[in-house]
Amino acid sequence: MKDDNIIRINTVEECTELLGCPLALHPLISICRLADIKGCVPIGKPVQLNLYFIVIKDGTNCTAKYGWREYDFAKGLMSFFAPGQIHLWNEQAPQTNFWGWMLMFHPDFIRKYALGTKISKLKFFSYETSEALHISDAERLQVESLIESIDNEYKRSIDDHTQDIIVSQLDVLLNYAERFYTRQFRTRNSVESDILTRFQSILHTYFDSDKEKIITAKDIADELGMSTHYLGDLLRNLTGMNTQQHIHTYLIERAKSLLLTTNLTVNEIAFSLGFEYPQYFSRLFKSKTGQTPVEFRNMN
């Protein structure tokens, strides 16, 4: 799709008008119940929303795309969207008989606060929508309580304290989201264990094949159909190591085996593992083992 066809939304006012939300009461933030949204999104047209979004919902039926990937809104979940992503709706969502909230805010709303720096480090804003947060009934009550507190403050007359209070409440909400994601990684054992098995299989297959380059975290995430950040966080919660650390650990173990069971030179081993420059291999090996490849071979 050509870039010229993309609708770019840069302000809260533009966004509320585009999505059919109630009139915003603050120039940099809007919060509303999903049932109050008219649902007049531009069907079939890509939209770049240059705002932060937090959507908490249950019972909506609508097929859409985010970052060019399809997903549906049928299950209860929380989704987090960072500015600049492309959204595409394929159909209207019926705006009846469901629960949920939409909270949007401009980056300038939090820019002068610690949250303005912290939010860029919250990786779930770059997860795929298929990796949304599924909340329990108890968690939903906590979330709804926080959202209603934000909504109450949002509906008050704006004064010198409005922004400070809402930003602090947003910070608490995102802290809970981090907690709930950690719980999700640890409780969805059957799903996550399957992903770990597939991840290990991809590593085995890769290192048993002819390689022209070192496999990357993005390569594996793409193979598994998920975002790089979600895979890294999932592996860290399951094993204590992120994707890159797993790749390095596996690579070093393969290198040790080749050093001790073959007569290949260090350079030949480096090339066989996918390194373009052998010195990078030697540097990584020493950083992980405390020895150069030659020292390791001679001592064993």
Image: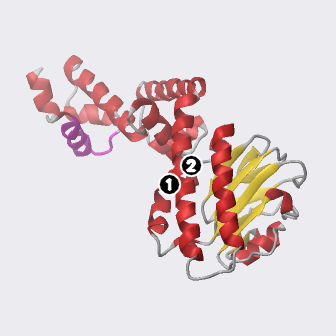
* In magenta stretch: residue 284: yes
Badge 1: residue crowd in 10 Å (few <14, some 14–19, many ≥20): some
Q: Position of residue 21 (x, y in %)?
A: 81, 68
Horizontal side of residue 229 vs 225, given as left or right: left
Q: Nearer the viewer, mark 2 or mark 1?
A: 2
Q: Name the amino acid, label 2.
A: Ala
Residue beneath the point at 20% across and 20% down: 260
Check the image and report above or below for 254 versus 55.
above
Q: Secondary structure at mark 2?
A: helix
Dots 2, 1 in contact, CB < 8 A: yes
Q: Position of residue 51 (x, y in %)?
A: 64, 68
Q: Quadrant of residue 71?
A: top right
Q: Name the amino acid, label 1.
A: Leu
Q: How is the image coloured?
A: secondary structure
Image quadrant holding the N terminus, namely bottom right
Residues shaded magenta: 275-288
Which label number is shown at residue 177?
Answer: 2
Q: Secondary structure at mark 1?
A: loop
Badge 2: residue crowd in 10 Å (few <14, some 14–19, many ≥20): many
Residue 298 shows in the view: yes
Residue at the spot of label 1: 122
Check the image and report above or below for 243 versus 165.
above
Image quadrant holding the C terminus, namely top left
- Circle nearer the N terminus (2, 1): 1
Residue beneath the point at 61% across and 65% down: 83
Q: Position of residue 220 (x, y in %)?
A: 51, 37
